[in-house]
Amino acid sequence: MEEPETKSVVRERVEGDCILSKYAETKDSHAFVSWKGICKRAHHRIKFEEYYGRKIKEDHVLHHKCRVKSCINPIHLEEREWGEHSSYHNRGENNVNVVLQEKDVLDIRSLYKLGGISYMGIAKKYGVSKGCVMAILTRRSWAYLEEENNVEG
């Protein structure tokens, strides 16, 4: 029996819990496939809609919880509002321009609490600006990182 036209028929490969689309150029790229013979659609979107039996809301995107863009495992996909998804990928270690890691930020806060080192001293040690250190310590940046006592600014 032939599969319905709405089903995508491919030979995926499994890597851990991820199901990787054979159409992706790399593990870190989305795959696009012909859809009903007329257009290209993101393979992970097709798989999500097939699995859950509904369309993705117009103002929503799919987030790969596994962080593997070529993964089409619907269980690894989470529907999010575009703005929420964008801010997730642009904060902390997810930001493409990141210099510090979360551990560095927590270390900077701990180092400052110990005393005996200035903002500038910390900045030089971590290769960032004094303003960056001030923003970390006053929680204007990296605010989502949990810590018992934050520095008031």
Image (cartoon, rainbow, N blue to C red):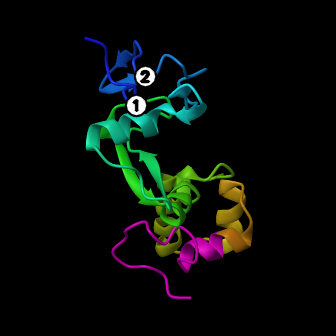
Where's residue 92, x and y in %? 54, 58
Asked if residue 116 can be seen in this view, the reply is no
Q: Residue at x 60, y 32 (%)?
A: 39
Main SS of residues in magenta: loop
Label 1, secondary structure: give it. Answer: loop
Front residue (pair 101, 40)? 40
Asked if residue 87 can be seen in this view, the reply is yes
Pointer 2 residue: 20
Quick check: 7 left or right of 126?
Answer: left
Quarter of the figure that contains the C terminus: bottom right
Tag 1 and tag 2, C-beta contact below 8 Å: yes
Quick check: 7 left or right of 86?
Answer: left
How many residues crowd mark 1 within 10 Å: few (<14), some (14–19), many (20+)? many
Task: Give the extent of the magenta segment.
Answer: 133-153
Disc 1 versus disc 2: distance between alpha carbons? 6 Å
What kind of residue is marked 2?
A: Leu
Q: Residue at x 64, y 76 (%)?
A: 134
Where's residue 83, x and y in %? 54, 66
Would you place residue 44 above or below residue 98 in this image?
A: above
Quick check: 60 left or right of 73?
Answer: right
Would you place residue 20 above or below residue 82 in this image?
A: above
Q: Is residue 21 magenta?
A: no
What kind of residue is marked 1?
A: Ile
Quick check: 148 left or right of 31?
Answer: left
Pointer 1 residue: 72
Q: Quadrant of residue 150?
A: bottom left
Q: Is residue 135 magenta?
A: yes
Where's residue 16, x and y in %? 31, 22
Where's residue 86, x and y in %? 56, 59
